[in-house]
Amino acid sequence: MDALDVPHPVITVGSDLTSRATAALRWAAEEARRSGAQLRLVTVWHAGVASHEVMPPASERAAMMADALADAGLEQDQASVVMLEGRAGPTLVEAARGSSLLVVGSAGHVGALGAMSGSVSRYCVRHAPCPVAVVGPSAAPGPVERVLVSGTLDPEGSTFRWAVRQAQRDRADVHLIDSWYLEPIVPSYPELDVRVREEARDRHAQMRQRLEQISGGTVRVTESLASGHARDVLQARTRSRDLLVLPYAALHHISFVHGRCPVVVLPPEVPATAPARPATVTETASTVVPLA
């Protein structure tokens, strides 16, 4: 059983309840609808030692969460909501235990209700026990048209099975996007350029064959091979309704991919089994906000 097979799956989405976090919440809500998962909206409050910020009163928090759900097209009974106190990154990672997916935004602000900043998303993809979807402000909610994988960044094909399962569910294509890159050297050697291109084509063909074997003809497999750094190729060729799936190991080759589409990063090992429910949080650390 993998992350897509979690019984009664839960999608945890971190939000600072601002308009900048709307895209991530909308995308998470749509993902929950398509997968039949429960949506858990988590916002984190932290006041540092030198901070004069205080947690807003319960009535104000309830109104903010209700507005956030409404912006995502959700009724108040379609998601559980919880406010946690602590550092945003570690608190979200702990809250996501037992979830099938953790969704965070790639930009935000630092404030009393926490931060969906780049540092938080980077912490989550490096420490979360489940796949993490990083959603930028330009991501469009709705059906995924292509699930992208990269043999260049995933030479073992560790993300292929997860990507195929996602494409099967969404009736989307699986697109293999690879690249080849030769550092500029002086003097130049044309024969080296030819050799690098031929090796890239051979690897690309092998990864295409592996992907087709995994899919077993259940989804359409498309492909592209481009010249350029993998990061630049991904940023240039992704579309808003794509879903890019990367392994944890890819983060060591590129700092992060801020493309036009959501990026799912799988942990080093997607657990064979997963807890039936999210880990609980102690009463002193959490506040469940009533919306009714």
Image: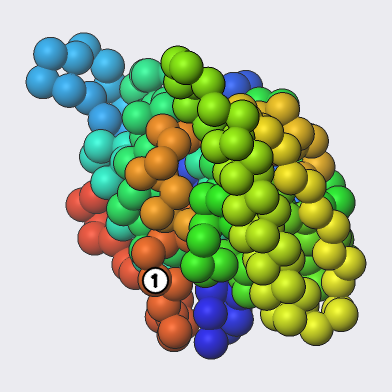
What is the three-letter code of the residue carrying label 1? Glu
Which image quadrant for residue 120? Answer: top left
Left or right of 127: which side holds 191? right
Does residue 85 appear in the picture of this structure? no
Q: Residue at x 36, y 44 (%)?
A: 252
Q: Residue at x 21, y 52 (%)?
A: 284
Q: Is residue 45 above or below residue 30?
A: above
Which image quadrant for residue 157? Answer: bottom right
**Residue 207, percent across and down?**
66, 65
Q: Is residue 250 above or below residue 120?
A: below
Does residue 117 appear in the picture of this structure? yes
**Residue 54, percent across and down?**
28, 21
Depth order, front residue of 259/120: 259
Which image quadrant for residue 222? Answer: bottom right
Depth order, front residue of 220/171: 220
Q: Is residue 177 above or below residue 220?
A: above
Colour scheme of this structure image? Answer: rainbow
Q: Residues within 10 Å of mark 1 (few under 14, many from 20)?
A: few
> Which residue is label 1 attached to?
269
Q: Residue at x 34, y 49 (%)?
A: 126
Q: Is residue 285 above or below residue 22?
A: below
Secondary structure of the residue carrying numbered label 1: loop
Left or right of 240: which side holds 234? left
Furthest toward the left, the residue is 49
Left or right of 54: which side holds 194? right
